[in-house]
Every structure is written in C-alpha cells, then in structure tokens.
Image (tube, rainbow, N blue to C red):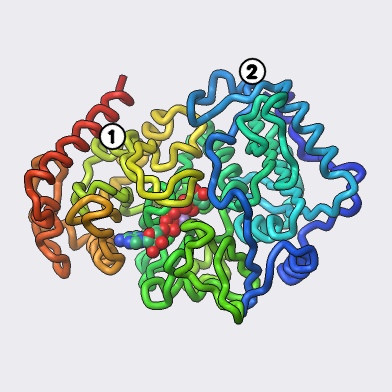
C-alpha cells in the first residue's frame, strides 16, 4: 500500500495554465465569477448561477477506476460503474490538456473535522463559482499537503467522448481511489463536487473502523447528539436546523471511537419553497457571499424560492459560520438517538416507529424511501427506491460492511433508533399530502427529549413496526396510518405490497 499511496497526486502542479489563483477570498471569487459571466449578484449579496443541462447529480455518469485494489474492495454493479485504468489515463491527460492556457482557481483545504481522520483536498476549478462552493463546503485550513490528499479537477466545459473513453455520455464523474484523484467533466452541478469527495471518504474510513454516514447531526444543551440519516430530499438539512439545538452538520459525518464528526465545513440546502416562516434558520443563512444554484430572481434580483421553472432542486451553499445555530465545533460525542428518514410516497408507512438494533440494521440495509424530484436526472415525481445506507449512490463498498459497523456502534453506545416518515400521509402521492413540517418537528422533539418512550407502543399489522399509540400534540389518527386513509381496503392492499417488497429487500441483503 505504501508505494501506492506515494502514487497519489499530492504534489501535483498544473502545467502551462495561464494563471492559477489559490484560496481567494469570497469577494474575490464572486468578482471573478461576475466578470466572467458565470452568474449575477442577488439583492442579498449572494452569487446566483445557472448550471445548464445538469441541475442534479447524474448517477449513470459516475465511474470508479477499476484497478488492482478497487477490483476486490468496491461493490461493482449498476451504482459503482467500472472505468478501465487505461481509459482513465487518457481522460486524465485530456483533462490536463484542457486546463492549458486557462485561468484556474484552486481551493486547498481539508475534509473531515477530526484530525485523526482528515484528508487534504485540492480542487482545481475552471469556474470561480465551483471554487466558491468548495470553499464553503470543505474545511478551510492551512494544513500542509500530505500523501493523504485528494486532488479534484472540476472542468464542466471539458467533454469526454463516450465512443472512445468508455463513458456513458460526454459528461463523467470519475473517482480514482488508488491515485486519490477525481475528474468532473461536463456537469456544473455543485452537488457532484461534495458527493464525489463523500464517496471517497466512504471508501477509506471503514478501513479505520470509522462509519461514514449520510446524515445530519445536531447537539442539545446536555451535549446529546442526534443523527438524521436520509436520502436526498428526505429532511436531513431541514430537521437538523432546530432552533432549540446547535447544528454540527447537515449531510456527511463519520462515527469513530471518539464520537461523531462532520466531514464538511458548510451546508447545501434545498431552496424550493423555502420560507422565513417554516425554515427561518436556513432562510437567514443565505446572506452575503452565499451561492445560489438555479434559483429564479425577481426583477430587483430577490430570490423567488417558489419558482421551480429551472428545477425543483434549487440550492444554496453557505459556510457553517453563516448559520446562527452553528455549534462551535464540527464534532460531538457519540449519538444518543438516531433517526432514519424515509419519504414514503405510497403514504402507508407510519410517521414514526421505534427500531431495535436488529430492526435498525435491517432497515439500514433495505433503505426504503423515495427519490424526490430533481436531485437526480430524470426524476420528476417521487419514486419508491431501496437505497441501502440511505445513500447507496455514495457507498462504494458492500452495504453489509457499513451495516455491521452501524450495528456494532449502536449496541456499544446503547443508542435509541427511530424510523421517521417525512413523506405522504392519508393516501399515496397525488391523493394524500406530505406530512407538514410542524408535525414532523413535534415528533422529532418527542424522539430527542425521550418523551416518546413514555407512550404505549403497539405493533402495526402490516410492517410489524413498533409504533406509539399516543404522542402529545400529534393527531392520533395519523400515528397509525390506516386511520388517515378514507379507503381502508386500498390502504391494506398498498401496505401489504410495500411490506412484501421491504421483506424481500431485507432477505436479499441477508443472503
Ligand atoms: N415533513 C417534512 N419534513 C421534512 N422536510 C419536509 C417536510 N415536508 C416538506 N419538506 C421539504 O422537503 C425538503 C427536505 O429537504 P432537505 O432537508 O434539504 O433534505 P436532505 O437534506 O435530506 O437532502 C425541504 O424542501 C422541506 O421543506
Ligand atoms: C446534494 C445532494 O444531496 P443532499 O440532498 O442529501 O444534500 C445530492 O444528492 O445531489
Ligand atoms: Mn441536505
């Protein structure tokens, strides 16, 4: 391994570029972005850009280089697509040639707030707004470059050739785990930048017995940490921004023997229908210097968060220091409770259920939820999916490796686990409605404060889930979902169908 580690790009210096500017300030990056026509300034002083063809991730264009190490350690298939090493080499040399005579913006910092499990990150960007995003989402630090360093090239204007490069289109997100290099071609969507690094962390950390998690984290006055796992759009960012608690991070964390730690230094919030009333903390975090993607502006350049004419997946990126409830550290102790978020588009799952460590492992592997509109190409309405670890697109290893680590840690730390449905109630998507945020927040409060444990629990008939019979402030008819459906037979049919699918997913992972 030693020899291979030395083969990383940690000492890489781009050649023949016109200029390279490293770690510019926020105003400098915004000035360059505006000068080059990348975006416009909003009335609040954010930079607002449009990302063109790609306004969400493109999972069919995401590859991992197939080499002597990844060969046996990556879980190859429809999610982790292999790219032969020889094709990677050609693409990389074309990418470096593409950078020639360009003004390149470099961000250099790190990922992982626990110094024991930290990686340096260097991002070489064609566009200033990609460097601004990197500055917000990664951790700004003056660490010297070590061999534990990821090198990323964000070149949206560079096209690969599916004919000769063995890619699926002219865009590609390529991870080379051995060389610790990432190439992003063809897509301007900033989500690819953070999720590419996340995927690398998810590959390397389990080797060190650290569980990487697609979850948000917050901490209460008594130093009690809560984690919210969930696929994109299920509520990690929304629910972790709780005025009664401090935010540790909204999307990616590690769980080591020391406790939990954020990988990132900022947040990436969905903006669609964002309002001061419902989500004041997120709303107020979008201030001078933040980056807006695909948000429509009014004539006086005020963001119109209700407008989804470019995409449902409008986004804001900002640093943790912009968040009024940010914790003073990007890490915390072992969690006291864990919430698995699922957005059930069938409207048949109970809003909340309590899970035993065994159930938790099973639901983690099954990962039932919906893909919500916009975060991936081609998704225009909620679509049921089984996304293991509540983040299958970002997990390069076999799901069982993550699930075993999780099970061990929740047993060791005696963590309380719950399943929380932030999706539809009273009927499927199109008939019922999405459970409102206020109700969800009330349930979350019962979970965090432990008052849910005072309730009498019953077993639901369809999923075998342990659900509370009564929770103060929550309409009793929604706790057992059949009661909120007008057509009980229809409920029973849909619930049984889903329960069977869940069961067979769980069985599949046990084989
Ligand atoms: N009951 C609910 N709980 C959480 N989010 C909800 C709920 N109802 C609607 N939403 C909306 O769903 C989206 C959740 O997105 P977000 O928190 O960014 O997800 P994630 O961080 O998991 O990708 C937000 O736009 C939020 O306003
Ligand atoms: C940024 C993304 O995820 P999340 O919504 O979980 O932040 C994404 O999936 O592109
Ligand atoms: Mn989020």
Which quarter of the image is occupied by the C terminus? Answer: top left
Quarter containing the N terminus: top right
Residue visible at 60% across and 44% down in the picture: 197
* SS for callout 2: loop
Question: How far across and how far down the image is residue 447, in percent?
Answer: 25, 59
Q: What residue did someone put label 2 on? A: 68
Residue 7 lies, with reference to residue 182, above or below; the image says above
- The x, y position of residue 335, in whole percent, is 37, 52
For the residue pair 404 and 348, the one nearer the viewer reads as 348
Taking the spot 79% from the left edge, 63% from the top edge, the residue there is 36
Per the image, the residue denoted by label 1 is: 362
Mark 2 / mark 1, whichever is N-terminal = 2
Which labelled disc corresponds to residue 345? none
339 relative to 254 in the view: left or right: left
Q: Quadrant of residue 97?
A: top right
> Where is residue 159 shown, x and y percent of the image?
72, 39
Real-space Cα separation, disc 2 to disc 1, in angstroms:
32 Å
């Amino acid at each position: 391994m030693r020899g291979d580690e030395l083969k990383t790009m940690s000492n890489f210096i781009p050649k023949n570029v016109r200029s390279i500017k490293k770690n510019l300030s926020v105003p400098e990056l915004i000035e360059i972005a505006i000068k080059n026509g990348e975006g416009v300034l909003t009335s609040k002083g954010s930079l607002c850009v449009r990302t063109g063809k790609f306004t969400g991730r493109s999972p069919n264009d995401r590859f991992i280089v197939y080499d002597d190490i990844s060969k046996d350690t990556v879980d190859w298939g429809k999610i982790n697509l292999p790219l032969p090493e020889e094709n990677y080499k050609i693409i990389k040399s074309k990418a470096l040639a593409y950078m020639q005579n360009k003004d390149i913006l470099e961000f250099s910092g790190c990922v992982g707030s626990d110094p024991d499990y930290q990686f340096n990150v260097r991002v070489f960007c064609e566009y200033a707004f990609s460097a601004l995003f990197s500055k917000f989402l990664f951790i700004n630090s003056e660490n010297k470059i070590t061999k534990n360093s990821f090198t990323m090239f964000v070149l949206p204007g560079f096209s690969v050739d599916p004919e000769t490069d063995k890619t699926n289109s002219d865009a590609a997100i390529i991870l080379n785990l051995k060389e610790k290099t990432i190439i992003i071609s063809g897509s301007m969507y900033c989500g690819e930048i953070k999720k590419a690094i996340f995927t690398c962390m998810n590959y390397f950390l389990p080797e060190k017995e650290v569980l990487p998690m697609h979850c948000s984290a917050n901490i209460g006055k008594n130093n009690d940490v809560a984690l919210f796992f969930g696929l994109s759009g299920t509520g990690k960012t929304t629910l972790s921004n709780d005025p009664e608690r401090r935010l540790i991070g909204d999307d990616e964390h590690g769980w080591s023997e020391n406790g939990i730690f954020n990988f990132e230094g900022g947040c990436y919030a969905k903006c669609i229908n964002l309002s001061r009333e419902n989500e004041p903390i997120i709303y107020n975090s979008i201030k001078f210097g933040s980056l807006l993607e695909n948000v429509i502006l009014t004539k006086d350049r005020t963001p119109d968060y209700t407008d989804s004419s470019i995409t449902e997946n409008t986004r804001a990126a900002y640093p943790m220091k912009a968040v009024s409830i940010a914790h003073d550290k990007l890490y915390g102790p072992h969690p006291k409770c864990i919430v698995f978020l699922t957005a059930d588009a069938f409207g048949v799952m109970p809003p909340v259920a309590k899970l035993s460590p065994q159930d938790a492992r099973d639901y983690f592997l099954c990962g039932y939820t919906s893909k919500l509109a916009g975060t991936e190409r081609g998704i225009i309405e909620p679509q049921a999916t089984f996304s293991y670890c509540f983040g299958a697109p970002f997990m390069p290893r076999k799901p069982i490796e993550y699930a075993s680590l999780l099970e061990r840690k929740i047993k060791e730390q005696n963590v309380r686990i719950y399943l929380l449905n932030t999706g539809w109630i009273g009927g499927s998507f199109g008939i019922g409605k999405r459970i409102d945020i206020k109700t969800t927040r009330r349930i979350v409060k019962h979970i965090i404060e432990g008052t849910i444990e005072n309730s009498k629990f019953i077993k639901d008939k369809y999923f075998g889930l342990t659900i509370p019979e009564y929770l103060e402030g929550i309409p009793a008819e929604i706790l057992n979902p059949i009661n909120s459906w007008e057509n009980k037979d229809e409920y029973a049919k849909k619930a049984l169908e889903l329960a069977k699918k869940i069961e067979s997913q769980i069985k599949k992972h046990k084989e």
